[in-house]
Image (cartoon, rainbow, N blue to C red):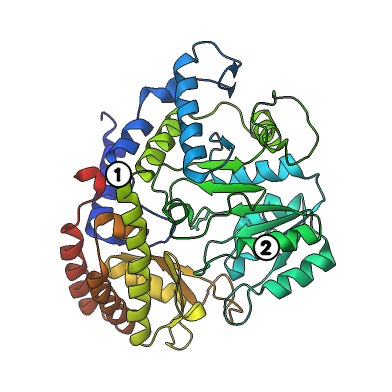
């Protein structure tokens, strides 16, 4: 690369990732094949529209790329239709709202401070500005309280029930949520960004055939490039014209909202990389990977608990853990910094009913997708938990943290990034 400045920064980031353990649950390490597609000549091509219905010439190759990505997504998730053009998760959710709602309609999603997402109706995001957002919470025990969600839905009568989370360590009861949505005539959106890789591997129940629309980003447990997909059932052959808001018309409604509603030309290099990731996720070894992600998370949960850490909901069913540090006397920021100093990257996070507030929360959120991709197993989780305890206890002792960081680096270097293999 001729640009020395950027080259050096890429090398620095490569070394940072190699020398340390990435435990932010929304991160992962993509394969060399995903990177190859992402860095390909497909980035040069404009192709506004959809395969067979483009506003540019020369789309015969990118049509095949997009069709391949769509077909792989449909097969993997078991749905009739897949739109693979959304630039990322936030625009994808905005596109779904645009497809099915009018400005000012009521949406009901999990509050950000209880593990939801900005785009599920948080007041400073477009979803909370252009729509009338009402937000549900978890119960005191950290679990979704389905009875309370039902009561709120009856009272608020949302047009859309948004289900999904960024910091929820338990399984979603899709059927129960469907019933709640049906009782008030609401659309149901399942934002499975965090758990998509677990779903396709059979490690978490799928909302396919239950939710009206499924949205997932492609770079988390699915282990692809940054990007998103919108999945639904319905008649995919409807031409791209204005249609009524019915379930049968969902594919057309979604496609029109993505383009021309929200976006211009699709990112063909990103679409190709999504297709590669979907192919990888359909292989038997991906099933084994997803199983190991959950096994590692459960083992880490048990090890942290045995060292006195409180976990929201007491454990995990999926890839992530939410640690409530109130009993340890350390803030989320302090823990994030201490762990960062030893080479374990996590992020501070609110816990349900957080006494400290969102800007200086009481918890940390951590997950196993990236370290499992590198090959770490349950025995390593014992070691990781031990380092976490030591780092948090010795957060002010720079010598101790330095020693720990050398141990973390030694282990990390035994497990190369997949793109280096
Ligand atoms: N920021 C992502 C996460 O970390 O979960 C969600 O967009």
Q: In the depicted view, which residue is nearer to us: 365 or 123? A: 365
Which residue, given by chain and number where applicable, does mark 2 sit on?
Answer: 177
Mark 2 CB near ligand 1 (8 Å cut): no
Q: Mark 1 = which residue?
A: 9
274 or 246: nearer the viewer: 246
Q: Label 1 crowding class (10 Å Cα cut-off): few <14, some 14-19, many 20+?
A: few
Tally the numbered discs. 2
Question: In the structure shown, which secondary structural element does the residue marked by tag 2 occupy?
Answer: helix
Local packing at callout 2 (Cα closer than 10 Å; few below 14, some 14-19, many 20+) is many
For the N terminus, the image quarter is top left
From the top left corner, tell me how far across and down residue 419 is, in percent.
25, 43
Query: Furthest residue to the top?
Result: 57
Eyeballing the image, is 254 above or below 77? Answer: above
The residue depicted at 29 percent of the width and 54 percent of the height is 373
Q: In percent of the image, x 43 and y 66: which residue is there?
A: 320
Residue 292 visible in the snapshot: yes
- Examine the rendered structure and indicate whether residue 400 appears above or below residue 54: below
- The mark that comes first in sequence, 2 or 1, is 1
């Amino acid at each position: 690369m001729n640009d020395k400045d950027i080259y050096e920064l890429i090398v620095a980031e490569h070394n940072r990732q190699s020398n340390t353990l990435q435990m932010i649950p929304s991160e992962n390490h993509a394969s060399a094949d995903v990177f190859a597609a992402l860095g390909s000549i497909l980035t040069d091509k404009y192709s506004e529209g959809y395969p067979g219905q483009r506003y540019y010439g020369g789309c015969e190759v990118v049509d095949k790329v997009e069709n391949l990505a769509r077909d792989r997504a449909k097969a993997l998730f078991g749905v009739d239709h897949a739109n693979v053009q959304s630039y990322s998760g936030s625009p994808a959710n905005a596109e779904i709202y645009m497809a099915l709602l009018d400005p000012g309609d009521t949406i009901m999603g999990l509050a950000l401070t209880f593990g939801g997402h900005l785009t599920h109706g948080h007041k400073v995001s477009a979803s909370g500005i252009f729509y009338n957002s009402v937000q549900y919470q978890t119960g005191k025990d950290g679990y979704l309280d389905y009875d309370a969600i039902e009561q709120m839905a009856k009272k608020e009568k949302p047009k859309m029930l948004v289900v999904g989370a960024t910091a929820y360590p338990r399984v979603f009861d899709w059927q129960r949520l469907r019933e709640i949505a049906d009782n008030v005539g609401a659309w149901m959106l399942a934002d499975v960004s965090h758990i998509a890789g677990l779903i396709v591997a059979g490690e978490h129940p799928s909302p396919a055939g239950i939710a009206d629309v499924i949205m997932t980003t492609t770079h988390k447990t699915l282990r692809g490039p940054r990007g998103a997909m919108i999945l639904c059932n319905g008649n995919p052959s409807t031409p791209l014209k204005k249609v009524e808001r019915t379930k049968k018309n969902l594919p057309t409604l979604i496609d029109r909202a993505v383009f021309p509603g929200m976006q211009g030309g699709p990112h063909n290099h990103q679409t190709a990389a999504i297709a590669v990731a979907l192919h990888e996720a359909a292989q038997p070894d991906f099933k084994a990977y997803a199983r190991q992600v959950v096994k590692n998370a459960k083992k880490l949960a048990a090890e942290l608990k045995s060292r006195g850490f409180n976990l929201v909901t007491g454990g995990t069913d999926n890839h992530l853990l939410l640690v409530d540090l109130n009993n340890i006397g350390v803030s989320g920021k302090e823990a994030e910094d201490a762990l960062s100093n030893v080479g374990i990257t996590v992020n501070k996070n609110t816990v349900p009913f957080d006494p400290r507030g969102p800007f200086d929360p009481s918890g940390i959120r951590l997950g196993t997708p990236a370290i499992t991709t590198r090959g770490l197993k349950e025995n390593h989780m014992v070691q990781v938990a031990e380092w976490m305890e030591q780092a948090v206890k010795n957060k002010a002792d720079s010598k101790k943290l330095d020693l720990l960081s050398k141990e973390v680096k030694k282990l990390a270097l035994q497990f190369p990034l997949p793109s280096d293999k």
